[in-house]
Image: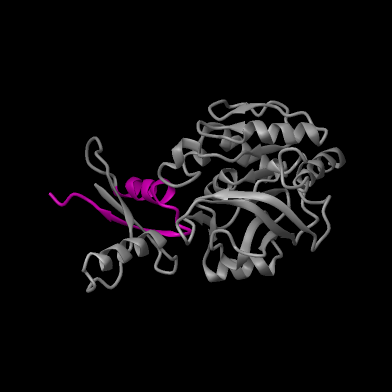
Amino acid sequence: MLTFPGSLDDVDAARAVRLAGGEPVALWHADHDLLDVDAVVLPGGFSYGDYLRAGAIAARAPLMQDVVARARQGMPVLGICNGFQVLCEAGLLPGALTRNSHLHFRNRDQVLVVERADTAWTADYRTGQRIVIPVKNGEGRYVGSTEDLDRLEGEGRVVVRYADGNPNGSSREIAGVTSENGRVVGLMPHPEHAVEDLTGPSTDGLGFFTSVLKAVVNA
Amino acid sequence: MVVDVVLKPEISDPQGQAVLGALGRLGHGGVRSVRQGKHFVLEVDGTPDEAELKQIAETLLANPVIEDVELHLPTD
């Protein structure tokens, strides 16, 4: 669990890891030590106040360089919301996230369709499964050039897509994408906010965290 | 040294569109389009190294996936 100045959802995400049966480890952006972690979650929030561009400064933080190096070797990395923005800025995932087309911050429970149920973070879902997890962002509109989007779709790298309404104007209803090897996943909605009946609209988000535990045990 | 960063033409700019809407309400109906960008002013020691400044602009100040940069070097 990598915390930057301005991260907000690191505690919720750590709790989700624990509920899934994992052991969350706190990491600080300015350190240069990934300790012995098996996977990294970049949580939501507003790292560095979203200055310059959302995720831009965090993507160049000291520990992110280690995360990028380990991710390229196959370590699973999940970026949620601001974490997704960081992964795009760091070049681990294609495309970019920018201001919502309607300019409003949007938060609501969102229906998603899982299109890839074979990544390190989504193996506990079924292809085509509809899940409900909260979405909350002001700069969540996924964009890329037409050629890049065509290539992404051609390679089957859209992991989750918005259904029953697009909350932010994202190109082709894309809510989350993966790296070529399926180990790095970024998405704007927040699975860590849908892990308990008491506090979430469902427990549909837990699958991200149980999936990765199996991925690292099987590795 | 000045760096201007603007969204690529194919990326829609809802902030610019909101400004355009406000201009229309203020009676400036003749404004056809507004694109909003960022303007960076950098002061550097010694003579600016154009290659380094270009690198700064393209690796941090702008995201080349969605933005274009314009460099303006001092002309003295």
On the image, the x and y values in percent for residue B23 come to: 26, 64
Residues B42 and A209: in front is A209
Report if residue A91 is visible in the image: no
Picture quadrant where residue B72 is located: bottom left
Task: Give the total of numbered labels.
Answer: 0
Picture quadrant where residue A117 is located: bottom right
| Image quarter hosting the N terminus of chain A | top right
Picture quadrant where residue A206 is located: top right
Residues A204 and B61: in front is A204
On the image, the x and y values in percent for residue B25 come to: 27, 66
Residue at image x 66%, y 46%? A190
On the image, the x and y values in percent for residue A157 come to: 69, 61
- Is B51 contained in the magenta span? yes
Residue at the outermost left position: B76
A168 sits to left or right of A217: left
Report if residue A23 is visible in the image: yes
Q: Which residues are magenta?
A: B50-76
On the image, the x and y values in percent for residue A147 come to: 56, 70
Residues B51 and A93: in front is A93
- Is B13 contained in the magenta span? no
Rendered view: A168 above or below A213:
below
| Image quarter hosting the C terminus of chain A | top right
Residues A177 and A163: in front is A163
Residue at the outermost right position: A218
Residue at image x 73%, y 27%? A36
Report the colour scheme: one colour
Rendered view: A127 above or below A183:
below
